[in-house]
Image (cartoon, rainbow, N blue to C red):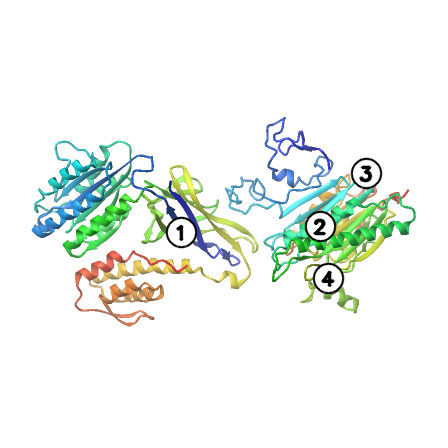
């Protein structure tokens, strides 16, 4: 965690403990919307932050820019101020970031995420996404506690320096299993005693240690690998009724749109029969994006190749900008309807290839999400972080 | 120190495309203290009584007793005066030599009672002159925070034009509050109601002269229990919204919409007069531009303000939903008071039609009133309506006008029409 941050008003550097900005006199005690949800601009102006504030609400209205009254509603247009829990971002390093958003249709954000990364690109990163199961009372609190508990376990463990690849995988898998237990304990700790509908959530976490990515999953939140060139991959298999149908031969499109599409067969929480994670290991030997997300994103773009196309289409910043890209993907999901909470976390692996085609704006009006890749020049395969 | 609280009763869920939000806001005041104790300024009372020829010896005697009973309730230190009215107005106490008021103490109370003893029934009725004199008398004491009057009449305003009365009422608006009473059956409810509603007071019938003293005593005791001199109901509505109406619905129905003054572009204020330890319910209706399903916003901030300070606030919300089980529900408080307001209107319109000889309209309106009184469980209204109509079927509102109706029963129904029953919460 860095000691220096930027003043939310004038961007002058300020100490973490200071109450007022030396440059402009702005009060720093109450984080403003700008501080908690940095503008999704590319580059390094955005402050690095790993402990977002997720209680309270925006100081200015996200719809009309009016000031938000103490009662939590805009003093001009009356719109409910976006709660900091409803929309928050994390950016522990320039190459790792995530956006967690309420979406449009749900009244609160039960998704959660927690990230950790070392400053050096492609060195060590932890991504955790938990999707609180609605209909249970405290899922928004429980999912955030779970994600943070898991992140804290994983941030402490590192397999680098350990000899064989097999041993390093074993260390990460063990850490992930411990993280699942910590997350499960956190969910139970945030469940009211005797709750008729105990809090519960899904779990997906990725540990990146140099080029080694190990992913663990419980439920239907997902991890993907989108190399700049080459075959995009979905790294997790949902613990869901839809996945069971797919395994038995039903098409993905049909299974994921069926009446039971969102019924999950595994979850974390006091009423979970089994929360053993399934793990996947991958050696990332080329530049690309690791993406972990909740179903609020993949509902609109499930197949790895479709989601990869969308990512590549939106990834047009001069410098890889995981926060901007995650924000674009969340915005896109909202324009598709935003029926569920949306969480997108990203880690950029390796330098980006040269882009010779002009960027394509990502909007709801974009006719097809498959169109991006054909026009891209494949970048050089120089992103192997093991070298 | 008075404390205020506000509670909101509403169904915040609107269907897709829905725009109208209704809410009942209950404002409760506790610890109001005594009149004149708020520190904002002194309290003052004027007793205005009819001494026209029609009062006769018996009613004059009753008025003298009632005025004395009222003065007994006025707290020591409160400024007061007594006005005797007929076709002109006379400052009976402290006396006509010079317009003014005095503070209540044992000596001034005794002197005032002595002055009341001089009342003689003579002359006509011009209530506008009474109100004008009261306005002038209140103005003689600078810095009064709370000004209240009781007005008693027994007849129709014969000795001035309706326009003159209107001008006098408008001159008194915002200057003082006035509870109005009519004794016997020779006065006009609508005329006196006009004075009472503009001056934020009550109107009621005193059927027999011997009930007057108890009524005056009760009015004055209530006024002395109003330690909060003046408060305003404020309604904030978002940009682009329209305030459809603001209505007090308990303890009486009183439409405040037209009494709006602007605080700022988004906030209106409505005078509510002085407050004691009591609860009042307000029905606020707001029209919003419809938003997408899933969106939430504030439809109104309903506040009570004393001077510039907001002392209580209730939030009226709007949430658009596609769930019919949520959006089709009508809040019981909103439904109850919507019915009660319509009941008051139906009674007043029915009686007006009956008075003008329009039997069909009277039967329809009073039938609807019977139906609404039954639906909203207003048994007092049902009892009063039974004296005017024979009820064949309360459920369908089928009634017949009774042939022989006591005028006093009709007036009692009219004056009580705005009184509402509280919703069972």
Nearest the viewer among B284 and A311 is B284
**For the residues marked 3 and 4, what is the alpha-carbon distance in whole angstroms?**
35 Å
Kind of element beneath mark 1 = strand
In this view, the residue in front, B105 or B211, is B105
Same-subunit check for callouts 4 and 1: no
- Residue named by callout 4: A266
For the C terminus of chain B, the quadrant is bottom left
> Spatial distance from mark 2 to mark 1, Cα to Cα?
43 Å
Query: Circle 3 sits in a helix, a strand or a loop, which is it?
Result: loop
Name the residue that disc number 3 marks: A120
**Residue B26 tag number:** 1
Which residue corresponds to the image point at 30% horizontal and 56% vertical from the top-left?
B419
In front: mark 1 or mark 3?
A: 1
Alpha-carbon distance for marks 4 and 1? 48 Å
**Circles 1 and 3 on the same chain:** no
In depth, the one of B186 and B158 nearer the eye is B186
User: Is disc 4 on the same chain as disc 2?
Assistant: yes
User: Would you identify the image quadrant in which residue A245 lies?
Assistant: bottom right
3D distance between C-alphas at marks 1 and 3: 60 Å
Reading the image, the residue beneath label 2 is A147
Q: Residues within 10 Å of mark 1 (few under 14, many from 20)?
A: many
Q: Is residue B341 shown left or right of residue A122?
A: left
Q: Are marks 3 and 2 in contact (CB under 8 Å)?
A: no
């Amino acid at each position: 965690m860095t000691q220096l941050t930027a003043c939310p008003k004038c961007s002058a550097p300020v100490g973490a403990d200071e109450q007022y900005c030396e440059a402009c006199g702005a009060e720093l005690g109450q984080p403003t919307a700008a501080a908690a949800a940095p503008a999704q601009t590319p580059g390094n102006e955005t402050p690095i932050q790993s402990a977002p504030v997720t209680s309270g609400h925006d100081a200015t209205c996200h719809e009309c820019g009016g000031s938000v009254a103490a009662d939590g509603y805009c003093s001009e247009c009356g719109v409910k101020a976006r709660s900091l829990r409803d929309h928050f971002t994390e950016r522990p390093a320039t190459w790792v970031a995530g956006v967690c958003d309420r979406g449009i249709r749900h009244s609160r954000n039960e998704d959660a995420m927690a990230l950790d990364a070392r400053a050096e690109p492609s060195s060590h990163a932890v991504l955790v996404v938990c999707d609180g199961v609605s209909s249970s009372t405290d899922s928004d609190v429980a999912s955030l506690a779970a994600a943070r508990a898991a992140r804290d376990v994983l941030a402490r463990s590192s397999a680098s320096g350990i000899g064989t690849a097999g041993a390093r995988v074993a260390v990460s898998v063990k850490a992930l299993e411990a993280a699942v237990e910590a997350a499960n304990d956190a969910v139970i700790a945030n469940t009211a005693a005797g709750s008729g509908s105990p809090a519960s959530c899904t779990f997906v976490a990725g540990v990146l240690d140099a080029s080694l990515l190990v992913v663990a999953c419980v439920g239907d939140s997902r991890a993907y690998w989108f190399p700049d060139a080459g075959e995009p991959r979905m790294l997790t298999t949902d613990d869901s009724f839809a996945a069971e149908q797919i395994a038995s031969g039903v098409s993905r499109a049909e299974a994921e749109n069926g009446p039971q599409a969102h019924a999950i067969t595994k979850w974390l929480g006091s009423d979970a029969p089994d929360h053993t994670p399934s793990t996947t290991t991958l050696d990332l030997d080329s530049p690309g994006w690791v993406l972990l997300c909740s179903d609020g994103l993949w509902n609109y773009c499930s197949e790895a190749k479709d989601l990869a196309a969308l990512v590549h289409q939106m990834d047009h910043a001069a410098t890889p900008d995981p926060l901007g890209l995650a924000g674009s993907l969340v915005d896109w999901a909202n324009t598709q309807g935003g029926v569920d909470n949306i969480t997108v976390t990203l880690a950029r692996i390796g330098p980006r290839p040269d882009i010779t085609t002009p960027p394509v704006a990502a909007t709801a009006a974009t006719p097809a999400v498959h169109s991006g890749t054909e026009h891209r020049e494949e970048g050089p395969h120089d992103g192997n972080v093991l070298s | 120190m008075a404390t205020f609280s506000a509670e909101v009763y509403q169904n915040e869920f609107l269907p897709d495309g829905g725009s109208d939000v209704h809410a009942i806001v209950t404002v409760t005041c506790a610890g109001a203290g005594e009149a004149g104790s708020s520190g904002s300024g002194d309290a003052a009372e004027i007793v205005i009584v009819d001494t026209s020829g029609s009062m006769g010896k018996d009613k004059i005697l009753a008025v003298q007793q009632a005025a004395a009973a009222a003065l007994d309730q006025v707290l020591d230190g409160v400024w007061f005066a007594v006005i005797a009215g007929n076709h002109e107005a006379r400052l009976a106490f402290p006396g006509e030599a010079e317009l003014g008021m005095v503070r209540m103490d044992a000596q001034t109370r005794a002197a005032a009672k002595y002055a009341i003893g001089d009342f003689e029934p003579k002359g006509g009725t011009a209530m506008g002159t009474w109100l004008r004199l009261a306005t002038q008398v209140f103005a003689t004491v600078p810095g009064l925070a709370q000004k209240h009057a009781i007005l008693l009449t027994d007849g129709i305003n014969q000795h001035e034009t309706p326009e003159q009365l209107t001008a006098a009422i408008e001159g008194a608006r915002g200057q003082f509050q006035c509870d109005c009473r009519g004794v016997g059956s020779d006065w006009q409810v609508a005329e006196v109601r006009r004075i009472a509603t503009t001056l934020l007071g009550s109107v009621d019938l005193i059927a027999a002269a011997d009930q007057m003293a108890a009524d005056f005593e009760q009015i004055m005791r209530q006024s002395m229990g109003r330690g909060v001199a003046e408060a305003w109901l404020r309604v904030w509505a978002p940009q682009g919204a329209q305030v459809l109406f603001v209505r007090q619905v308990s303890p009486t129905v009183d439409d405040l919409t037209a009494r709006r003054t602007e605080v700022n572009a988004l906030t209106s204020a409505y005078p509510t007069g002085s407050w004691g330890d009591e609860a009042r319910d307000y029905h606020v209706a707001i029209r919003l531009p419809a938003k997408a399903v899933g969106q939430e916003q504030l439809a109104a901030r309903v506040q009570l303000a004393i001077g510039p300070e907001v002392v209580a606030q209730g939030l009226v919300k709007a949430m658009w939903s596609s769930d019919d089980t949520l959006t089709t529900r009508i809040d019981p408080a909103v439904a109850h008071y919507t019915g009660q307001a319509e009941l008051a209107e139906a009674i007043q319109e029915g009686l007006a039609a009956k008075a003008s000889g329009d039997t069909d309209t009277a039967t329809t309106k009073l039938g609807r009133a019977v139906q609404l009184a039954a639906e909203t469980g207003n048994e007092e209204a049902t009892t009063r309506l039974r004296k005017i109509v024979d009820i064949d079927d309360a459920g369908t509102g089928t009634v017949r006008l009774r042939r022989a109706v006591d005028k006093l029963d009709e007036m009692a129904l009219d004056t009580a029409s705005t009184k509402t029953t509280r919703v069972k919460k």
